[in-house]
Amino acid sequence: MSTNNRMPDKIRVDTEDLQSVRVGTYIGEDMTYQGKPFTGFEIHGYYENGQAAGETEYIDGEQMGWVIEFYDNGFVERETLNYGATTVYFNEFDRDGNKTIGGFIAKHLLEKVCAITGEDPNNIKE
């Protein structure tokens, strides 16, 4: 597992354990897990060392919240907080975990996406 998880209390499930049921309201496709709309993070594969390569957050089956890509050393490479198809916030980091670029794109949606995902808006800083 990564060294820098967002919302570590949420379930994380491998892509092959999710089922696509239809096109979603906000973006992409609705996903189910064990027959119910999925809430948690979908893991997008692993590096040879077992480190997760990336993860995408879903709420009630729809992509909503964080999309995070990791380096093979466990540090975050890129993270975006999305309200459906709209990027609210993003960061990019080097392999040592130092932020190289980032900030708000649609700050006016921060409270809305945080209310849906349960993320604390105080965790999102410029």
Image: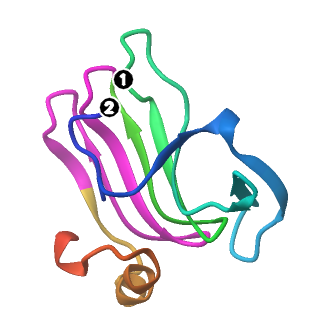
* Left or right: where 26 falls relative to 48: right
Can you say whether 125 is above or below 17 in the image?
A: below
Residue underneath mark 1: 51
Amino acid at circle 1: Gln
Estimate the x, y position of residue 82 in percent, counting from the top left. Answer: 48, 68
Residue 114 is labelled as: none
Give the mark nearest the N terminus, 2 or 1.
Answer: 2
The secondary structure type at the circle numbered 1 is: loop
Question: Magenta stretch containing residue 74, yes or no?
Answer: yes
Quarter of the image that includes the N terminus: top left
Q: Is residue 117 above or below residue 57?
A: below
Image point 13% across, 40% down: which residue?
Answer: 98
Q: Image point 22% across, 27% down: which residue?
A: 95
Taking 79 as reference, is 59 left or right? Answer: right
Q: Tell me what residue is drawn at x 44 percent, y 17 percent.
A: 47
Q: Which residues are magenta?
A: 72-101
Instruction: Please indicate whether residue 39 sits to the left or right of residue 78 in the image.
Output: right
Disc marking residue 1: 2
- For the residues marked 2 and 1, what is the alpha-carbon distance in whole angstroms? 6 Å
Q: Secondary structure at mark 2?
A: loop
Residue 16 is one of the magenta-drawn residues: no
